[in-house]
Amino acid sequence: MASKSKLQKSSIEDRISGLPDAILCHILSCCTTREAVQTSVLSRRWKNVWASVPSLDLDEQKYHLDYVNRTLPRPLRYVLSSFPQFVNRLLLFRSPINIHRLHLKTTMTSDASLIHAWISTAVKHNVVELDLCVETPTEPHFEIPKSVFLCNTLVSLKLWLSQDVSVVTPSAKCFPCLKFLHVTVWCPDSDSMDKLFSCCPALEHLIIDGQVDDVLSYNINISGPKLKRLQISFIVHKFDTRSSNVVNYVCQIFVNADAPYLEELDIYYDFLVSYSLTDAKSMRKAKIDFLDVDELDNLHCFLGLADRVRRLFAEIFNVKYLSVSAAILGALGIKDQHLLPTFDNLKHLELQLQTCCCLQSLPTLLKLSPNLEHLVFENNTKFCADDNEDEFVHEWDAPEFVPVCLFSHLKTICLREFKGCPNEMEVAKYLVKHGKALNKVTIYTRFCEEKEMKLQPPIASLCLEVSKFPRGSKTCEIGFLTFT
């Protein structure tokens, strides 16, 4: 039995070892680079396979967790980092084939010349995807190698940009083939933010996220003649500027995007960021959400916010798909809401509720969308009632005139996280009653527990009550879906 078991095991090993080098390299590319190197001890067949793997995963933190902390005695773990020696030997004995992907993350290495040399080696080997994160301060101050900006093979770049890492672009001919750029920032210097995105001739997808300080002024100029998708999510670390015991926040972060072929915009909105889009006539999809809903209680502290919101809406008027946080209209007074543009091309609207008072945004957005065909209405409020009372706060007032889209174009309505509180019931009843072109209304509700169960009516009675709503369309069907 033992010999038979060994024979089966040997047969399996022979099958794997008999695979072509290209397949073995593909398998090893799913491992960390250190794990790939370890396979060299398996047999003579595996001795040099690791050297031809086109992807390098060099994460100093993982290296210490997987190797140093498990093999070295505790007193020696932090005496000297062996990561630089490992990377140097790896690059020295690696075969001279191209490096398709390099993921490099340093957390202890402080020698900037070493990190610079590793990146330059990848560029010389025609790197296509580069993921770079330098977390620790280096000596001297670390500057992204100029060869990265001039690399003709680089298509995808992920960069962690902090105040300890600077960007100095060498010329106007930067990133000749770069199509994807994801930059995570942590209070970077303003010069790097200003220059990094100003020349991206082939860029199609740009993501900028992270944290910045409102005490610094940032002018982020994005120039992307081929840019199709832009995602921005900034957390602004706010510092109070007090005058007569009043807190005022002044916007000093300006994003200017010159992208005539931009199709999708995704903004996780911070109140201290201003957006300007140049000639965004090709935009078909936009999503605008809030970072911190708690700040909605202090909208008056954010000077000029109404103008920033109104300008942003004016620049995305051409979209066909819009997902918006309803509370964003709370930053606008009645006068500003009247100055909002009409979304003549809008077919699909998703409205996110954070508080019950956001319900008043629905009539405004319906009025601005005369050709709307699909409406998704999501209630993200935890409760629709006061914590100490069983009475619901009334925040819904039906508009004086029925919006054009309701009796002419609106075909489907989807109500998510439906809790059945009086405000929601009134909204649903209004939409079903006046939806002359409606074909389908889908209501998603969930089984609730504890306090929510006391506030929310039973599922069966909720379905029965909604099904009795008067319908403006004879072909309208109302469906219910429950989830936990």
Image (tube, rainbow, N blue to C red):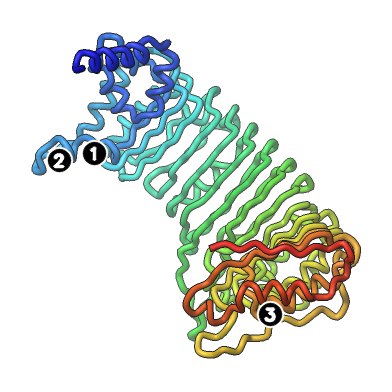
Q: Which mark is residue 77?
A: 2
**Element marked by disc 1:** helix
> Whole-percent x and y of residue 195?
55, 43
The answer to whether residue 163 is visible is yes
Front one among 128 and 8: 8
Q: At label 1, which amino acid type do we have?
A: His
Front one among 161 and 290: 290
Question: What distance separates the C-alpha of mark 3 from that of mark 2?
Answer: 61 Å
User: Mark 1 — residue?
Assistant: 64
Q: Answer yes or no: do the residues labelled 3 and 2 have beta carbons within 8 Å? A: no
Left or right: 347 as drawn, with respect to 359: right
Front one among 31 and 88: 31
> Whole-percent x and y of residue 92?
29, 17
Q: At label 2, which amino acid type do we have?
A: Arg
The answer to whether residue 337 is visible is no
**Element marked by disc 2:** loop
Left or right: 289 as drawn, with respect to 359: left
Above-or-below relation of 405 to 170: below
Residue for point 68% across, 80% down: 423
User: Mark 3 — residue?
Assistant: 423
Mark 2, residues whose alpha carbon is within 10 Å: few (<14), some, or many (≥20)? some
